Image: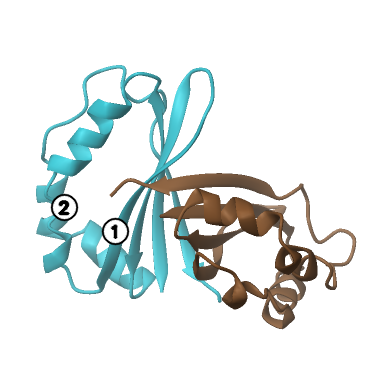
Chain colours: A brown, B cyan
Amino acid sequence: MFIAMNRFRIARGSEPVFEALWRKRDSYLDEVPGFVEFRLLCGPEDEEATLYASHTIWESRQAFEDWTESESFKKAHAQARAPKGTYLDHPRFEGFEVVL
Amino acid sequence: MFIAMNRFRIARGSEPVFEALWRKRDSYLDEVPGFVEFRLLCGPEDEEATLYASHTIWESRQAFEDWTESESFKKAHAQARAPKGTYLDHPRFEGFEVVL
């Protein structure tokens, strides 16, 4: 199993806008081969930002990579974006293999 | 749901030792109220280290906090430790609430 994780630093006060975007967004993931599960997580905050993480669980790294080159990926990323100032940094991607 | 995540920077070459410790370790988590699932994940590497993350999923943040004050927690943390030089930093803890 493979977990594709993105970490987002969201400006304090913009959390409701950010969460609403994810709630409304159609990820089209259910139609994608090898997709297992999606979670949006809210983590620790500091003075400037709240850390969010998205976890998308795949049967394999290959299934994830195939998805990034698919029409479903393009459709999911062609939707409404957050207003300027919502993100304090670029999202930070990390891919993890499940060991145990 | 709550995810307790620890991030570990493991010296290049020490990955097998680190993974073997987790495989052998008895976490005693199955006996703990509110415990849902445990995963050890292997992430990206740089010149010095490989990033690992442990994900422990709980029914609530409270269940996690109760565990950290329990006998099960003490037992799980009284076991064999990795040799000096395995960890390049202290483990970094982050707690996440599941939003979606």
Q: Residue at x 49, y 54 (%)?
A: A3
Q: Is residue B76 visible?
A: yes
Chain letter belonging to callout 1: B
Mark 2 nearby-residue class (10 Å; few <14, some 14–19, many ≥20): some
User: Given contact means CB atoms under 8 Å apart, are the residues at marks 1 and 2 in contact?
Assistant: yes
Residue extending farthest to the right is A84
Q: Residue at x 12, y 41 (%)?
A: B24
Q: Residue at x 64, y 59 (%)?
A: A67
Please tell me whether residue B83 is drawn above or below residue A42 in the rendered image: above
Residue B27 at x, y = what percent? 16, 52
- For mark 1, what is the residue? B38
Disc 1 or disc 2, which is closer to the eye?
1
B2, A69: nearer the viewer: A69
Q: Is residue A87 left or right of residue B99?
A: right
Q: Amino acid at mark 1?
A: Phe
Residue A41 at x, y = what percent? 54, 66
Between marks 1 and 2, how big is the CA–CA gap? 9 Å
Marks 1 and 2, the one that precedes in the sequence: 2
What secondary structure is found at the residue carrying circle 1?
strand
What secondary structure is found at the residue carrying circle 2?
loop
Res. B60 image quadrant: bottom left
> Which quadrant: the N terminus of chain A?
bottom left
Q: Residue at x 47, y 46 (%)?
A: A96
Q: Say which mark, if any, is on residue B27.
A: 2
Mark 1 nearby-residue class (10 Å; few <14, some 14–19, many ≥20): some
